[in-house]
Image (tube, coloured by chain):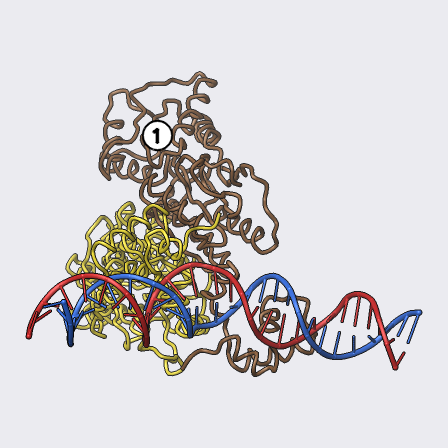
Chain colours: A yellow, B brown, C blue, D red
DNA sequence: ATATAAAAAGGAATCGTTTCCAACCCCACA
DNA sequence: TGTGGGGTTGGAAACGATTCCTTTTTATAT
C-alpha cells in the first residue's frame, strides 16, 4: 500500500496541496482553523513528507554531513559521539563520509558542495587542501573541528602550542626536568595538522624559559608500524642518560609508554613520569596524567553552532574558537 | 551556475535522455558507440546524477542506515568502525540513526520502513519490540548485529552462554575457584538483551559441573549511577569471604574492578584475578584478560552481508550467525 | 450596502531522474 | 524489392514535494 502523499492529505482536509505545504512549512499564511484541519488529516493518515521530493523541489535535504578521516582512534570517536548526541533531538539526519587521503577529501568536499546533498557540513580534522578549486563555498554552512587549515570557515580547535606549554610546566613543577617527547611524524602529507609540531614547540619554549635540559636524543617522531610508539619508548627508556619524564602527543602513545615501562620493570612515576594528551575515556582507567581537551564537548559545540546556523539562520563568525585545555593530574606524573 | 543535468548530457551527446539514463544504469540496450559518446559528454560536463531525483523517481536511495543505541560505549563504536571501513569503497552513504529507548526504536524503524529513505538497514543491538506492527518487513534488506530479538532477520551475534562458560573454565583452570560476577541489571526494559543473564548462566552451569563453590553474595547486577561497578567491586573486595576472581560482563566494568583493587592495595592477579568481556581496544593497554568477541570484524561482516544482498541481489539466509569467542590471556587472570 | 484592501487558498509549473511504450533503424531472408 | 523482427532510441509520464501566480474569501472602512 502506497504511503500517503500530500495530495491525499489535501483531499482529506478539503484543501489544496499548496495549503498543506504551507502548514508543513509553518507559513503564517494559513488560518488557524484550516491549519487544524490539515494537521488532523496528517495525523490520521500518518503522513510523513517524502524527503526526496522535498529535496528535489525545495533544495532542503535535512541532512548534515560529517567528513571524517577513517576513524578508529578514540579521539575521533568521542568527538563524533558529541556531535551525534546533540543532533539527536533535531530533525536532521547525520551522514558519515569517511576519507583516507587528502586527495580523497578534496574530491569528496567538491562533490558535496556541488551536489548539495547536505544542508550543512562538519569537517572533522580536515587536511590542508587547495581551496581555490572549490566551488561556491559561501552557500554551504560549514563548521570545522580540530584543524587550523580551513580558516575561511568558523573553526573550533585547541591551542596546541599552549598544550605543550601546560604539559611541560606541569612536569617541571613536579620536579621532572629531563623531559622526552614521543609524537607523530611532523610532515605527514595527508593528515599532518601541525598539532604535534606545535605541542613540541610549546614544550621547547617552556624548557628554554626554565633553562631546563634538552637533548635531541630524547625526541622521537613518527615512523612506520602500529607499535612504533612502543619502539620509541623502549629506546628512550634504555638510554644511559634517559629522560626523567615523557610527554606524548596522544594518550594512546602514553599507554604504550606505560606498558613498556612496566615490562622493563620501571615504576611509574617513580622511575619514569608520563603525561599524555587528549584525555580519552580510557585514560581515566589507565590513571594517566594528561592534558585534557574537551573531545565530547567540542563535538557538541560544533553541531550546536551548525544547527543555530541552519535553523535560526544565525551564522557564526568565521574565526577560530579555541577550546580550553587543562592538565588532569592522575597517577603517572 | 546550475550543475549539469541529464538533459544537458543528452543534448551534448546528441541522444535522448532515456539513452543517457540507460548508460547511467548500465543497461545493455545501448550500442557501444553511443555509450561512448554519452560517457564522453558526462565526463566533459562533470555530470553527477542528482540523488534526490533518482530516489524520487526510481526509489533507490544509495543510503544504508544504521540504527544504534546512543553510543558512547567503545563496543558500539568498534562495531561501527567495522561497518564504516567496509562501506568505504562502495557507492553507499551511511546514515546514523541513534535511539534511546525501545519505543523510540520502534517508531524509528517504522518510519524508515514506510518512508524508504534507505536501501538497507543495519540494526545494532536492537531491543525486543513487537514486530507485528511493523509494515512490509519483507521489502527492506535488514541485517541485525548483536541481538537475539529479531530472529526474522539474518543476525550476527555471539553465544553469550558459551562466553560465560569460557570465562569460567579459564578461571577454574588457573586455579581460581571462588568466582564473583559483576554485570548489568538483568531486566532492563529498554536495552536488556539477555546477554548478561546468559553469560551469568554459562558461569553457573560451569561452576556446578566443576563442583566449584557458589555464593550469591558474590554476584552483583546493575543498579544506578555511572560508577556502580566501582561500588560493586568495593563491596565484593571488602567481604571477609571475598571471591578469588571476578568475572565482569564488560571490559569497562573490569577496568573499574582493577582500579578499585589497586586503590585498596590488592595485587592483580595475585590477590584478586579479573576477567572481562569484549576485548575493546583499551583492554590491551590495561593488560586485561578477557573473553574476546570480534567487534570490528562483526561490523565488517554485517556490512558485507548487506552489500552482497543489495549489490548482487544475494540475500543471506535468515538465521543466526554465531561469531567466534576466545579467551585472551593477559595480565589480570 | 458597497468598495477596497488584505488575508487565505488553489493548483499549475518545476525540480531531475527512471520507466515504459512507441517509433525507428537495419539486416536477414524470401 | 518487400517484410519481419530484433536491437536501439526518443521522450512523455510519473515520482511528491515547493513556489509562485491567480483567484477567492474575509475583514475593514465608508
The residue drawn where x is 23% and y is 26% is B238
Residue underneath mark 1: B246
Is residue A160 visible to us here?
yes
The residue closer to the viewer here, B99 or B160, is B99
| Screen quadrant of the N terminus of chain B | bottom left
x and y, in percent, of residue B268 in the image: 33, 35
Residue drawn at 59 percent across, 73 percent down:
B20
Residue B277 x, y percent position in the rendering: 40, 37
Q: Quadrant of residue A44?
A: top left
Choose between A299 and A258: the one closer to the eye. Answer: A299
Residue B94: image quadrant is bottom left
For image coordinates 52% across by 80% down, the residue present is B8
Can residue A189 be seen from the camera position used here? no
Secondary element type, mark 1: strand
B224 to A236, vertically: above or below: above
Question: From the viewer's perspective, is B20 left or right of B290?
Answer: right
Relative to the observer, which residue lies in front, A18 or B165?
A18
Vertical arrangement, residue A164 with respect to residue B213, above or below: below
**Mark 1, other Cα within 10 Å: few <14 / some 14–19 / many ≥20:** many
Q: Residue furthest top?
A: B211
The location of residue B128, given as percent across then percent down, is 40, 35
Residue drawn at the location 48% of the way across and 18% of the way down: B209
Q: Position of residue B332 (x, y in %)?
A: 37, 37
Q: Is residue B62 above or below residue B111?
A: below
Which chain letter goes with mark 1?
Answer: B
Query: Toward which corner of the image does residue B329 lie, by quadrant?
Result: top left
Task: Locate residue A33 relative to residue B220 in the image: left or right.
Answer: left
Examine the rendered structure and indicate whether residue B208 appears above or below residue B144: above
Amino acid at each position: 500500500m502506497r504511503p500517503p502523499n500530500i495530495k491525499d492529505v489535501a483531499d482529506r482536509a478539503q484543501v489544496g496541496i499548496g495549503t498543506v505545504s504551507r502548514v508543513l512549512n509553518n507559513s503564517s499564511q494559513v488560518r488557524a482553523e484550516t491549519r487544524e484541519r490539515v494537521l488532523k488529516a496528517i495525523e490520521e493518515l500518518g503522513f510523513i513528507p517524502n524527503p526526496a521530493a522535498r529535496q528535489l523541489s525545495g533544495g532542503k535535504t535535512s541532512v548534515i554531513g560529517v567528513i571524517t578521516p577513517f576513524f578508529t582512534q578514540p579521539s575521533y570517536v568521542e568527538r563524533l559521539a558529541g556531535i551525534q548526541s546533540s543532533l539527536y533531538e533535531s530533525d536532521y539526519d547525520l551522514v558519515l563520509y569517511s576519507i583516507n587521503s587528502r586527495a580523497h577529501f578534496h574530491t569528496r568536499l567538491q562533490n558535496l558542495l556541488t551536489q548539495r546533498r547536505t544542508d550543512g557540513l562538519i569537517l572533522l580534522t580536515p587536511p590542508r587542501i587547495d581551496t581555490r578549486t572549490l566551488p561556491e563555498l559561501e552557500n554551504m554552512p560549514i563548521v570545522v573541528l580540530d584543524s587550523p587549515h580551513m580558516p575561511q570557515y568558523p573553526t573550533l580547535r585547541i591551542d596546541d602550542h599552549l598544550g605543550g606549554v601546560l604539559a611541560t610546566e606541569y612536569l617541571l613543577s613536579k620536579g621532572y626536568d629531563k623531559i622526552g617527547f614521543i609524537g607523530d611524524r611532523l610532515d605527514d602529507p595527508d593528515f599532518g595538522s601541525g598539532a604535534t609540531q606545535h605541542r613540541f614547540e610549546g614544550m621547547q619554549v617552556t624548557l628554554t624559559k626554565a633553562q631546563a635540559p634538552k637533548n635531541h636524543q630524547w625526541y622521537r617522531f613518527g615512523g612506520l608500524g602500529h607499535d612504533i610508539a612502543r619502539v620509541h619508548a623502549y629506546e628512550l627508556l634504555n638510554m644511559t642518560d634517559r629522560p626523567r619524564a615523557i610527554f606524548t602527543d596522544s594518550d594512546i602513545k602514553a599507554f604504550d609508554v606505560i606498558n613498556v615501562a612496566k615490562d622493563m620493570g620501571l615504576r611509574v612515576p617513580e622511575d619514569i613520569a608520563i603525561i599524555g594528551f587528549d584525555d580519552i575515556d580510557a585514560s581515566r582507567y589507565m590513571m594517566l596524567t594528561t592534558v585534557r581537551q574537551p573531545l565530547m564537548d567540542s563535538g557538541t559545540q560544533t553541531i550546536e553552532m551548525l544547527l543555530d546556523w541552519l535553523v535560526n539562520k544565525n551564522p557564526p563568525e568565521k574565526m577560530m574558537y579555541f577550546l580550553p585545555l587543562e592538565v588532569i593530574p592522575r597517577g603517572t606524573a
